[in-house]
Amino acid sequence: MTGYPVILERDTNGTFRVEVVDIPEANAVGEDEADALRNAVEAIETALEMYAEQRRPIPPPSTPKNGQATVHRPPATRVAG
């Protein structure tokens, strides 16, 4: 399965922030890139739980740009989506 493309940037305070391109409600922060990407998995899970509660369709991952990082949604949400 293709992961969700993300925008991963260093923030002004030295941490890293992640925005999930296809799920605007899923944003995360971390002390380093790996931490931010791990936290993005949790953000995706939380956003998709909200989508399910609201009976909204789960957006499919778009095609990442060349070299763009991706994050896979957690296995527990794969059944629901």
Image (cartoon, helix red, strand yellow):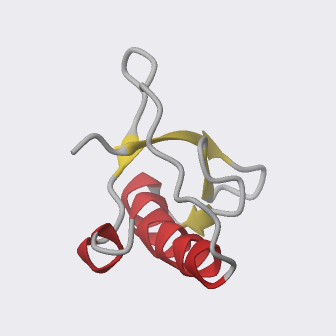
Residue drawn at 63 percent across, 45 percent down:
10
Residue 21 % position (x, y):
61, 41
Q: Is residue 79 above or below residue 26?
A: below
Give the residue furthest to the front. Answer: 55
Quarter assignment of residue 66: top left
Residue drawn at 45 percent across, 44 percent down:
60
Residue 46 % position (x, y):
56, 79
Q: Quadrant of the C terminus?
A: bottom left
Pick whichever, 48 or 41, lies toward us.
Answer: 48
- Image position of 70 (left or right of 31): left
Give the residue furthest to the right. Answer: 12
Residue drawn at 71 percent across, 50 percent down:
11
Pick whichever, 21 or 11, lies toward us.
Answer: 21
- Image position of 58 (left or right of 2): right
Q: Is residue 54 above or below residue 10?
A: below
Q: How many marks?
A: 0
Q: Is residue 70 above or below residue 11?
A: above
Residue 1 % position (x, y):
21, 45
Quarter assignment of residue 75: bottom left
Give the residue furthest to the bottom. Answer: 53
- Image position of 15 (left or right of 67): right
Pick whichever, 60 or 26, lies toward us.
Answer: 60
